Image (cartoon, rainbow, N blue to C red):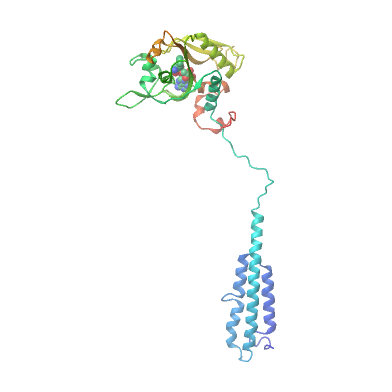
Amino acid sequence: MLSSPGRHGVSSGEIDQLRERALHELQEVTTHEALAQWHARYLGRRGEITQRLRGLGSLPADVRPQVGRALNALKETLETAYAERERIVRELELAARIEAEAVDVTLPGRRPAIGTLHPVTQMIREVTDIFAHLGFQVVEGPEVEYGYYAFDALNIPPEHPARDVWDTIFIESDQKEIVLRPHTSPMQIRVMERRKPPVRVVVPGRCYRYEAVDATHEWHFHQIEGLAVDEHITMADLKGTLAEFARQLFGRERRVRFRCDFFPFVEPGVDFAIDCMFCRGEGCRVCGGSGWIEILGAGMVHPQVLRNVGYDPERYTGWAFGMGVERLVMLKYGVPDIRYFYQGDLRFLSQFERIPI
Ligand code: FA5
């Protein structure tokens, strides 16, 4: 028997109570944090068991071994219980984490936001597709171009007033004249220099002009050039091809108009117009009341241009055209201002059809 309660602060009943209390509290512990607190309370350096073991010295010698054994047995019991509880808490915490982080595979997926192709890119694809089906090859060329290709070879010699029509941006150079191409026509020369007739190409690309920006003019825009050269090519082929193109792009009911125009690299030159799809030719704000909308410049390739690339103009004839891409998008979708294209405003850009990228 241990000594009676109260006298030395430790009795068997007290130790039983302590065990019961400690084990009961341990049962309630469900987190590592609470477990650490429990350990500190009972088994830590200042814990109840440790304190009591330290107090053994002040007990009378006759009860000391007994109390010591009982306290050590209690300590062992609590340590075992603690280790077991620690294992359970680890399992409980893992189960809670799995529960919290569970993935419900039956939930419908979140659709990722998919971008759209820029309307200008879409239009370039649409136009070049039409011409590809008509037998034209799509080629591209440099945006930084020699003056020779941009002007001279196109029958626009230096000092010729027509050179001013293309408000050109020049690149500083102490050798050859270098420009940011103001139109895609230089590619007529580059293609013909490299190939023998028959030639049938379309050339989409960026162009630059030193231009005051307004609702219909940008300093940076896109053109698509077309060129067909072979024996016996006539103006009738040009008219048929452009009419078919315009009807595929703007609707089969479109009427077309060719009028004389001047470009130094074609003879004769024409401007090509379609009847206004907004008022069906009656006259409205879009067509400026005329009922017609000009969509491109074209003409029979000038004999001098053919000579410049080494083609015999007595044997070969051809035609060329050049159109503004932004202009086509504006017409097709009723866009009132060219500046919308390059402001990067998604409210504008995302309105265009989603074409897979
Ligand atoms: C030319 O650039 C000629 N190279 C077209 C050509 C090719 C004629 C082959 C004959 C044979 P023009 O300067 O008119 O022509 O430009 C053609 C089109 O480019 C215009 O109708 C317009 O749609 C577009 N364009 C011209 N300047 C700008 C600009 N600053 N901003 C937006 N589009 C423009």
Q: In this rendering, is residue 56 above or below 166?
A: below
The residue closer to the viewer here, 150 or 198, is: 198
In what quadrant of the picture does the N terminus appear? bottom right
User: Relative to residue 70, is residue 138 drawn left or right?
Assistant: left
Vertical placement of residue 90 versus 278, above or below = below
The residue drawn where x is 40% and y is 19% is 193
Horizontal relation, residue 226 to residue 9: left or right: left
- Quadrant of residue 50 in the image? bottom right
Q: How many marks?
A: 0
The quadrant the C terminus occupies is: top right
Residue 128 x, y percent position in the rendering:
53, 22
Residue 275 found in image quarter: top right
Res 285 quadrant in image: top right
Q: Position of residue 72 (x, y in %)?
A: 62, 81
Q: Position of residue 101 (x, y in %)?
A: 64, 53
Q: Is residue 9 visible?
A: no
Q: Nearer the viewer, residue 355 or 342?
A: 355
Q: Residue furthest bottom?
A: 62
Q: Is residue 36 visible?
A: yes
- Residue 347 image position (x, y, % from top left): 56, 32
Residues 332 and 303: in front is 303
The residue positioned 64% from the left and 67% from the top of the image is 87
Q: Among all residues in the image, which is located at the extreme front?
A: 196
Relative height, residue 64 to residue 209 (above, below)? below
Which residue corresponds to the image point at 65% horizontal and 56% vertical from the top-left?
98
